Amino acid sequence: MDYSQTLDYLYSHLPMFHRIGAAAYKGDLTNINSLSDILGHPEKKIKTIHIAGTNGKGSVSHMLASVLQDAGYKTGLFTSPHLKDFRERIRINGKMVEEKTVILFVEENLKSFENLEPSFFEWTTAFAFDYFAKESVDIAVIETGLGGRLDSTNIITPELSIITNISFDHMQFLGDTLVKIAGEKAGIIKDGVPVITGERQEDCESVFIEKALEINSPLLFASDHYVAESISTDDEGQAFRIFKNKKILFSEIACGLKGDYQSKNICTVLLALEILKKKFPGIAETAIRNGLKNVIGNTGLQGRWQILNQQPLTIADVGHNEAGIRYVTQQLSRLNYEKLHIVFGMVNDKSPEMVLSLLPNQATYYFCKANLPRAMEASVLKAHADTFGLKGNVYTSVAEAYEAAKLKSGEKDVIFVGGSTFVVAEVI
């Protein structure tokens, strides 16, 4: 097979959650353990950091990887989903895995894997662990796909576990309360392994405290120790003033990621680095500063309050659940513009009401459906939006919606693209 044929096999023959939703979800670790056994348990041959959470885990993963890379460590990074290229999911020192490596792994393991009928994510996770082990990475940053306890990545015993925050998402799998969702995320906490949670949340912090006590894992809340104040924002990112235990740690430190929500993520990252320094002494202040400032160039992260154009100001953000959209709307409310245009789509296994209720009424909407089976029909989305007074038209594709928004926008307007990772991917 060539690369396109290999991807076609992975996409069309394997259940892929991000494309088809619930039908691809595997509620146990049986398959990934079997795949790992076939490969000789590569996850046991590498050091890892494991990151779960409803929002922010992608940003935290990329920031940590960028700093570790800048500190001189050969750093693996496994994230999902990808925006444009499958290989975005698996990187070493920011470089995507080569096409020929993807082809070779699939060809070598197709027969032995097929009997197990693994999902797309199980294949991909096994591949990432195998690749990182063969390349002898010093450390690999591993982001969960969905949840934690039953996520395919949860066969690792990491150096550090991180849970960014808890909000409502994937409730059909993780539970319909924050306590239940927290219980699933807490499943990544391992015996004796330090664990960080990004912030104290009254509804669910006791879940993490009890789990950590039960298995003797040191637990720290980043928000107890670090506070980040955004002091400036420009095209290159933003600058923060960082307080540690109420004293200034950095009077100014640059971060290449935009968005108010990064103030919480950077605190999580700084606490993680403080713990990791004990085993990775190369993490010096210079590496921290350079890694945070150059995170996009080092890791290739996209879709986090990403500026696509200046006139009109065009912004894309992959936030798609209640907490993510809440941050997006807060940031939109701070912008100065004549008119706001929102290119918007969702997937059909999300509750649209929770998200739509947060969106601004004073905007023109361009409802669209991303090109995947799991996406919500634009007409259905518009019908839901109508009940919240959100006015706009239905378009047959993301591209058509985006072009319509550009045609109707003046230079002093703002275009926002979001609601779904896949809508953002098609525009980028």
Image (cartoon, helix red, strand yellow):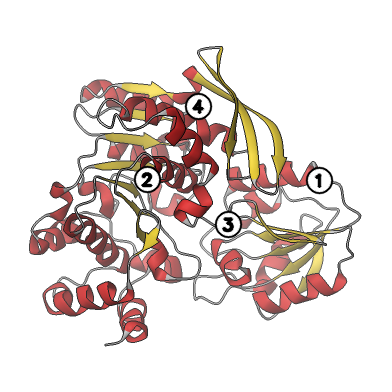
Mark 4 / mark 3, whichever is N-terminal: 4
Q: Which residue is mark 4?
A: 201
Residue found at x 26% / y 43%:
48
Tag 2: amino acid: Gln
Disc on the earlier residue, 2 or 4: 2
Vertical arrangement, residue 164 with respect to residue 210, above or below: below
Name the spot of residue 32 as percent of width and height, x first.
Answer: 19, 59
How far apart are the two marked residues, 2 and 3, measured between alpha carbons? 21 Å
Question: Distance from label 2 to label 1 (Cα)?
Answer: 34 Å
Query: Dot 1 surroundings within 10 Å: few (below 14), some, or many (20 or more)?
Result: few
Q: Amino acid at mark 4?
A: Gln
In the visual, does 83 lie left or right of 261? left
Q: Position of residue 321 (x, y in %)?
A: 57, 50
Check disc 4: other Cα within 10 Å, few if <14, some if 14-19, many if 20+.
some
SS at mark 2? helix
Q: Which residue is mark 3?
A: 303
Mark 2 highlights which residue?
Answer: 69
Report the Cα–Cα distance between label 1 and label 3.
18 Å
Q: Which residue is mark 1?
A: 335
Query: Mark 1 belongs to which amino acid?
Result: Leu
Q: Are marks 4 and 3 in contact (CB under 8 Å)?
A: no
- As drawn, 407 above or below 250: below
Nearer to us: label 2 or label 4: 2
Residue 16 higher or lower than 224, as above or below: below
Q: Position of residue 300 (x, y in %)?
A: 49, 57
The residue nearer to you, when weighing 221 against 242, is: 242
**Within-10-Å neighbours for mark 3: few <14, some 14–19, many 20+:** many
